[in-house]
């Protein structure tokens, strides 16, 4: 079939709306993540503009500032990182890697995706109606209660998160069922690619964590609208109950985001070192133990709420133990390269960037795990630096790594190599200039979530904003490259990255076009 | 990771500056580490932080060097045939055990510090700090129970030498060298009582009375800010603590007792319940 016909089919809106094909849905998730990421990035650009100098020059007031930072956090977590890593790459490649024809529940898969745009519309609506949700993504009551945020915004945010949660649970059920039941003959669990393992473990975590968030949000909704007092001391409730519930979800959530990133990095490091991953069983067990430990460390987000020695000592020790399985992963990636035959392609470049930057973020995580030291670090920019090193320089690098790696498989086309490298170096320098000075600001005591700061914090904030310019510019470069490559990119050769160890590359790249959007396979 | 080293060096130079200037408490531009330490707690925190940072810098340097070396030594152009080995039990055992030992070296001093912070010594003075949107109210139950509000000075009326957004109309005042018990609560949303120079931070939670302590070693004015998002003016809710010698403190108390209204226990508990 001709390229013209192909394009015509792809443009058919109905085909995209009603598709149940895992590849088409994966593409939808990725497109959605790119759009949401652009929105979340634009908001962060606005935030850095405000913070580039002291004074409140751009935002209307503190409430709209708070609403923006809340939207930035929620958009990046629920509508960018998770849809890209789990919905996008998971849908595309889990079935291909395990030899399944599609996901176990294709219709449910479609539902899971289409809940997300609805959810995002609801969240954006919460910014436009009333005063916005000025609580931070952690939504602590009483600030998120009806007295703290009287308008409808918080209710809309809660419903948006409920929808996103339902979407996540649906897709998690689908992944678990698919991976456990639809592996092709004789593919044992311990023969699955690490990316499949990472999606399986993340999905199991989602099934445990999401309902807890849903419960907390439902209680908050009841407090706000139906005279509840779950979190209201005057009615016998306690805000700390919300904190416990939120972080019982919130901490596993960060591993839900990072495990698929680990999976992608494992595939890429192995491929471009020309050998299977080193220490495979250890890698699987490391992910499993990170997931298990992830459920018993939540109170390290609450070291300053007023606990005594024993609980804080427990959560300090439990949090630090996570460094052990994480260390196993980093060392195994290095060991895979050691003795390998390394090709420093664009995806490999992003993967190496991930490993080093994630190690930096992990190290500051060890610092923060100590309840004793956390007294001066909690809620400061040190924390902002830490979680952007693991998410903005960690998870996001992994998304780009996976995107460049699988781009020829997904589109049948190649991107210009030099643009990929330029994008990497600009983003690498930009994000480091943006986030590294935040460690200094945090040590100096700058609280997070403030719209204006004492003049002594000016210097590093200015530098951070300059870094943001470079990071955002490189993201624009990526978007332009994407638009051009999708239409005009050179056709990808069959063995574009050399010999593969996984099965998603088995069929012809010409078949990359999503099955659900095509009329017939004839001529392919 | 070169940057991590900079933090460390920056810390050393910042400490030297602190030693020379004595009482530069407000954050300064291009500061790369903690500001002044005015309590033993803070000094211990800084020591633990530096201990962990040193280990962290070594870990990041090790990872970066291994990757750099692998890139040089095992590039496809120099090493065309990849090894087929995928298991080395002794090596995997080693890189599982080594981090455990390193973590042990962190955990021991960390728990000591935590115990030091958690164990409140016999206090000579109790001060209550109550968070409100968007100011703090300090009361002195041991000194007759007077209470007053501490509100950020608008930028236009900040006196010369005092920092914008940190200067307040009425500071919390403590005697130098005395163990002060600080009770923290909130009348509305969650706030956080954060005083970096003293190594102090604890949430102000509605419906709860949290307790912490400090002993300020050096006289001076120390600044902090509310450190938990608390609505419209979260950015404008500073904390200023002035530490003075005991006789000066006694004089301040005599004056304050006449200037500020007494808040009875009943008023306070009504406030907490609200």
Image (cartoon, coloured by chain):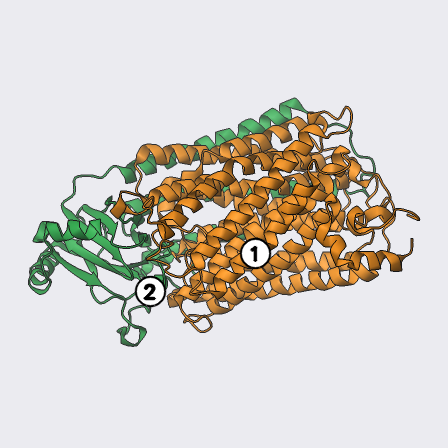
Count every numbered label the image shows and give the total: 2
Quarter of image, res A2: bottom right
Q: Please give left or right for residue B144 compared with residue A172 in the image.
A: left
Chain identifier, orange in the render? A
Of residue A372 and residue A197, the one placed in the foreground of this image is A197
Q: Residue at x 68, y 32 (%)?
A: A179
**In the image shown, does A385 or A203 lie closer to the viewer?**
A203
- Evaluate whether residue A397 shows in this view: yes
Determine the residue positioned at 59% across, 26% down: B94
**Mark 1, chain letter?**
A
* Side (left or right) of B274 relative to A380: left
CA gap between label 1 and label 2 equals 31 Å
| Residue A469 against residue A345 in the figure, above or below | below
Pointer 2 residue: B236
Residue A397 in the image: state x and y as whole percent. 64, 50
Say yes or no: labels 1 and 2 on the same chain.
Answer: no
- Label 2: how many residues lie within 10 Å, few (<14), some (14-19) or many (20+)? many
Residue sitting at 32 percent across and 47 percent down? B42
Q: Nearer the viewer, residue A99 or A431?
A: A99
- Check disc 1: other Cα within 10 Å, few if <14, some if 14-19, many if 20+: many
- Residue identifier under label 1: A120
Task: Please identify which colour was used for chain B in the image.
Answer: green
Among the 4 quarters of the image, the one containing residue B73: top right
Q: Position of residue B92 (x, y in %)?
A: 62, 27
């Amino acid at each position: 079939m001709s390229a013209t016909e192909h394009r015509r089919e792809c443009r058919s809106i109905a085909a995209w709306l009603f598709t149940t094909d895992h590849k088409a849905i994966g593409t939808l998730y990725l497109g959605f993540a790119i759009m949401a990421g652009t929105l979340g990035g634009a908001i962060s650009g606005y935030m850095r503009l405000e913070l580039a100098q002291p004074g409140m020059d751009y935002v209307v007031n503190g409430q709209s500032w708070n609403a923006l930072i809340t939207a930035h956090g929620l958009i990046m977590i629920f509508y960018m990182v998770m849809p890209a890593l789990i919905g996008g790459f998971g849908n595309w490649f889990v079935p291909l890697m395990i030899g399944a024809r599609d996901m176990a529940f294709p219709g449910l898969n479609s539902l899971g995706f289409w809940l997300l745009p609805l959810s995002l519309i609801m969240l954006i609506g919460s910014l436009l109606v009333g005063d916005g949700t000025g609580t931070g993504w952690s939504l602590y009551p009483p600030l998120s209660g009806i007295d703290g945020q009287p308008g409808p915004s918080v209710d809309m945010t809660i419903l948006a998160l409920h929808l996103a949660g339902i979407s996540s649970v649906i897709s998690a059920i689908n992944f678990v069922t698919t991976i456990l039941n639809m592996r092709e003959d004789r593919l044992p669990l311990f023969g699955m690619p690490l990316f499949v393992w990472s999606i399986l473990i993340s999905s199991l975590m989602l099934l445990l964590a999401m309902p807890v968030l849903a419960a907390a949000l439902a209680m908050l909704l009841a407090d706000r609208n139906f005279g509840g007092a779950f979190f209201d001391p005057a009615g016998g409730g306690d805000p700390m109950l919300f904190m416990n519930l939120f972080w019982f979800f919130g901490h596993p959530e960060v591993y839900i985001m990072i495990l698929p990133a680990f999976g992608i990095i494992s595939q890429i490091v192995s491929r471009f070192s020309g050998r299977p991953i080193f220490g495979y069983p250890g890698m699987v067990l490391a992910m499993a133990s990170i997931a298990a430990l992830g459920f018993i460390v939540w109170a390290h987000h609450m070291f300053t709420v007023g606990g005594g020695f024993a609980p804080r000592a427990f959560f300090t020790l439990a949090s630090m133990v996570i460094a052990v399985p994480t260390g196993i992963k980093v060392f195994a990636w290095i060991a895979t390269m050691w003795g390998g035959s390394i090709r420093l392609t664009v995806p490999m470049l992003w993967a190496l960037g991930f490993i080093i930057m994630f190690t930096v973020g992990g190290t500051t995580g060890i610092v923060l795990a100590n309840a004793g030291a956390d007294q001066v670090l909690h809620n400061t920019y040190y924390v902002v630096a830490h979680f952007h090193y693991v998410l903005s320089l960690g998870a996001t690098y992994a998304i780009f790594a996976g995107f460049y790696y699988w781009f020829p498989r997904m589109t049948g086309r190649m991107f210009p190599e030099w643009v990929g490298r330029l994008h990497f170096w600009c983003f690498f320098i930009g994000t480091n200039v943006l986030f590294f000075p935040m460690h200094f600001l945090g040590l100096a005591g700058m609280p997070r979530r403030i719209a204006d700061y004492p003049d002594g914090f000016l210097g590093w904030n200015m530098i951070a904003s300059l870094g943001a310019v470079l990071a955002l510019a490189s993201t624009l470069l990526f978007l332009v490259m994407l638009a051009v490559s999708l239409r005009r990119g050179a056709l990808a050769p069959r063995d574009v990255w050399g010999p593969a160890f996984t099965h998603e590359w088995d069929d012809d790249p010409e078949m990359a076009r999503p099955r659900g959007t095509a009329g017939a396979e004839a001529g392919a | 990771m070169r940057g991590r080293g900079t933090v460390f060096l920056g810390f050393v130079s910042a400490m030297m500056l602190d030693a020379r200037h004595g009482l530069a408490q407000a954050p300064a531009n291009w500061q790369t580490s903690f500001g002044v330490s005015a309590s033993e707690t803070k000094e211990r925190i800084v020591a633990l932080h530096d201990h962990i940072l040193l280990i962290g810098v070594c870990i990041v340097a090790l990872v970066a060097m291994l990757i750099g070396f692998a890139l040089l030594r095992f590039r496809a152009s120099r090493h065309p045939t990849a090894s087929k080995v995928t298991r080395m039990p002794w090596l995997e055992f080693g890189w599982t055990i080594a981090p455990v030992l390193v973590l042990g070296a962190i955990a021991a001093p960390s728990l000591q510090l935590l115990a030091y912070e958690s164990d409140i010594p016999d206090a000579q003075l109790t001060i209550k700090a109550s968070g409100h949107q968007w100011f703090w109210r300090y009361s002195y139950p041991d000194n007759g129970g007077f209470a007053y509000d501490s509100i950020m000075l608008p930028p236009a009326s900040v006196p010369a030498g005092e920092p914008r957004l940190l200067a307040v109309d009425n500071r919390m005042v403590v005697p130098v060298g005395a163990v002060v018990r600080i009770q923290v609560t909130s009348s509305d949303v969650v706030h956080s009582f954060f005083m970096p120079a003293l190594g102090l931070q604890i949430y102000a939670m509605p419906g709860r009375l949290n307790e912490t302590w400090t002993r300020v070693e050096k006289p001076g004015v120390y600044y902090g800010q509310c450190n938990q998002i608390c609505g419209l003016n979260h950015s404008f809710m500073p904390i200023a603590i002035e530490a003075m010698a005991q006789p000066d403190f006694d004089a301040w108390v005599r004056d304050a007792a006449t200037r500020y209204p007494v808040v009875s226990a009943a008023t306070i508990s009504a406030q907490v319940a609200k």
